[in-house]
Image (cartoon, rainbow, N blue to C red):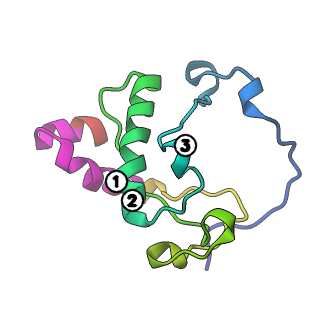
Amino acid sequence: RRWWHRSTKTVALRDARALGSSLDKNGAATATFAPLAEKDVGVALDTESVARDLFPAAERLLEKHTGCARAVVFDHVVRIASGPDNAPVSGAAAAPSGPINFVHNDYSVNSGRPRCRMLLKPFATSEAALDEVVG
Protein backbone atom coordinates (compact mmCIF):
# COMPACT_ATOMS: atom_id res chain seq x y z
CA ARG A 1 0.00 0.00 0.00
CA ARG A 2 1.30 3.42 -0.94
CA TRP A 3 1.06 6.27 1.54
CA TRP A 4 0.51 8.76 -1.27
CA HIS A 5 -1.91 9.14 -4.11
CA ARG A 6 -1.26 10.28 -7.63
CA SER A 7 -3.01 13.35 -8.98
CA THR A 8 -2.53 15.40 -12.11
CA LYS A 9 -2.23 19.15 -12.33
CA THR A 10 -1.27 21.32 -15.28
CA VAL A 11 1.44 23.85 -14.48
CA ALA A 12 3.28 26.45 -16.53
CA LEU A 13 7.04 25.98 -16.84
CA ARG A 14 9.22 29.06 -17.20
CA ASP A 15 12.93 29.75 -17.48
CA ALA A 16 13.90 30.34 -13.83
CA ARG A 17 17.10 32.13 -14.85
CA ALA A 18 15.04 35.13 -15.99
CA LEU A 19 13.16 35.44 -12.68
CA GLY A 20 16.04 36.84 -10.62
CA SER A 21 15.20 34.62 -7.67
CA SER A 22 17.22 34.53 -4.47
CA LEU A 23 17.63 32.01 -1.67
CA ASP A 24 16.52 34.54 0.94
CA LYS A 25 13.41 35.70 -0.92
CA ASN A 26 12.32 32.59 -2.82
CA GLY A 27 14.03 29.67 -1.10
CA ALA A 28 15.68 28.75 -4.41
CA ALA A 29 18.08 30.37 -6.82
CA THR A 30 19.91 29.56 -10.03
CA ALA A 31 23.67 29.50 -10.46
CA THR A 32 26.16 28.63 -13.16
CA PHE A 33 27.64 25.18 -12.62
CA ALA A 34 30.33 24.10 -15.08
CA PRO A 35 32.64 21.70 -13.24
CA LEU A 36 33.72 19.74 -16.30
CA ALA A 37 36.24 20.83 -18.89
CA GLU A 38 34.69 21.79 -22.24
CA LYS A 39 35.94 18.54 -23.79
CA ASP A 40 34.11 16.49 -21.13
CA VAL A 41 30.66 18.06 -21.52
CA GLY A 42 28.23 15.39 -22.66
CA VAL A 43 30.46 12.50 -21.65
CA ALA A 44 28.55 9.84 -19.74
CA LEU A 45 29.83 9.58 -16.18
CA ASP A 46 29.76 6.43 -14.10
CA THR A 47 28.76 6.46 -10.45
CA GLU A 48 32.34 6.70 -9.17
CA SER A 49 33.36 9.57 -11.46
CA VAL A 50 30.23 11.55 -10.57
CA ALA A 51 31.10 11.27 -6.86
CA ARG A 52 34.79 11.97 -7.47
CA ASP A 53 34.51 14.80 -10.02
CA LEU A 54 31.13 16.47 -9.52
CA PHE A 55 30.31 16.16 -5.81
CA PRO A 56 33.23 18.38 -4.64
CA ALA A 57 32.40 21.01 -7.26
CA ALA A 58 28.73 21.01 -6.21
CA GLU A 59 29.73 21.33 -2.55
CA ARG A 60 31.91 24.37 -3.30
CA LEU A 61 29.07 25.96 -5.31
CA LEU A 62 26.64 25.49 -2.42
CA GLU A 63 29.12 26.87 0.12
CA LYS A 64 29.77 29.92 -2.05
CA HIS A 65 26.10 30.74 -2.68
CA THR A 66 24.69 29.95 0.76
CA GLY A 67 27.55 31.08 2.98
CA CYS A 68 27.51 27.76 4.82
CA ALA A 69 30.72 26.47 6.36
CA ARG A 70 30.36 22.97 4.87
CA ALA A 71 28.09 21.40 2.25
CA VAL A 72 27.81 17.65 1.82
CA VAL A 73 26.60 16.18 -1.47
CA PHE A 74 25.85 12.52 -0.87
CA ASP A 75 23.67 10.91 -3.47
CA HIS A 76 22.75 10.82 -7.13
CA VAL A 77 20.85 8.66 -9.58
CA VAL A 78 21.96 7.88 -13.12
CA ARG A 79 18.96 8.26 -15.42
CA ILE A 80 20.59 8.01 -18.86
CA ALA A 81 22.32 5.07 -20.52
CA SER A 82 24.08 6.72 -23.44
CA GLY A 83 27.00 9.05 -23.93
CA PRO A 84 27.76 11.54 -26.70
CA ASP A 85 26.00 10.80 -30.01
CA ASN A 86 23.79 8.28 -28.15
CA ALA A 87 26.71 5.84 -27.91
CA PRO A 88 25.96 3.11 -25.35
CA VAL A 89 27.89 3.20 -22.11
CA SER A 90 29.07 0.35 -19.92
CA GLY A 91 29.40 -0.21 -16.20
CA ALA A 92 27.03 1.22 -13.63
CA ALA A 93 25.65 3.80 -16.08
CA ALA A 94 24.46 1.00 -18.38
CA ALA A 95 21.59 0.19 -16.02
CA PRO A 96 20.04 3.57 -15.24
CA SER A 97 16.98 4.12 -13.13
CA GLY A 98 13.86 5.00 -15.04
CA PRO A 99 12.40 8.48 -15.05
CA ILE A 100 10.30 9.73 -12.18
CA ASN A 101 7.15 11.18 -13.69
CA PHE A 102 5.79 12.83 -10.58
CA VAL A 103 6.93 15.29 -7.93
CA HIS A 104 8.31 13.47 -4.91
CA ASN A 105 10.49 13.74 -1.84
CA ASP A 106 13.04 11.04 -1.08
CA TYR A 107 12.79 11.43 2.69
CA SER A 108 9.94 11.26 5.16
CA VAL A 109 9.65 12.89 8.57
CA ASN A 110 10.84 9.59 10.05
CA SER A 111 13.68 8.81 7.62
CA GLY A 112 15.29 12.23 7.19
CA ARG A 113 16.92 12.64 10.60
CA PRO A 114 18.54 9.16 10.77
CA ARG A 115 19.83 9.55 7.20
CA CYS A 116 21.35 12.97 8.03
CA ARG A 117 22.98 11.58 11.18
CA MET A 118 24.52 8.73 9.20
CA LEU A 119 25.81 11.03 6.43
CA LEU A 120 27.12 13.80 8.69
CA LYS A 121 28.73 11.65 11.40
CA PRO A 122 32.14 11.52 9.61
CA PHE A 123 32.25 15.33 9.63
CA ALA A 124 31.15 15.89 13.24
CA THR A 125 33.74 16.82 15.84
CA SER A 126 31.67 15.16 18.58
CA GLU A 127 28.33 13.48 19.23
CA ALA A 128 27.15 16.72 20.89
CA ALA A 129 28.01 18.69 17.75
CA LEU A 130 26.09 16.19 15.64
CA ASP A 131 23.11 16.46 18.01
CA GLU A 132 23.22 20.26 17.66
CA VAL A 133 23.03 20.07 13.86
CA VAL A 134 20.70 17.13 13.36
CA GLY A 135 18.90 16.78 16.66
Q: Residue furthest front?
A: 39
Residue stretch rendered in magenta on the structure: 111-131
Callout 2 crowding tier (Cα within 10 Å): few <14, some 14–19, many ≥20:
few
52 in relation to 84, above or below: above
The residue where tag 3 is placed is: 38
Marks 3,1: beta carbons within 8 A: no
From this view, report whether residue 3 is shown above or below residue 34: below
Q: Nearer the viewer, mark 2 or mark 3?
A: 3
Q: Choose between 84 and 126: the one closer to the eye.
A: 84
Which residue is drawn at the image coordinates 68% and 69% (left, top)? 86
Quarter of the picture containing the C terminus is top left
- Identify residue for label 2: 49
Q: Quadrant of the N terminus?
A: bottom right
**Type of amino acid under label 1:** Arg
Q: Is residue 124 magenta?
A: yes
The residue that appears at 47% across and 24% down in the rendered structure is 65
Alpha-carbon span between mark 2 and mark 3: 16 Å
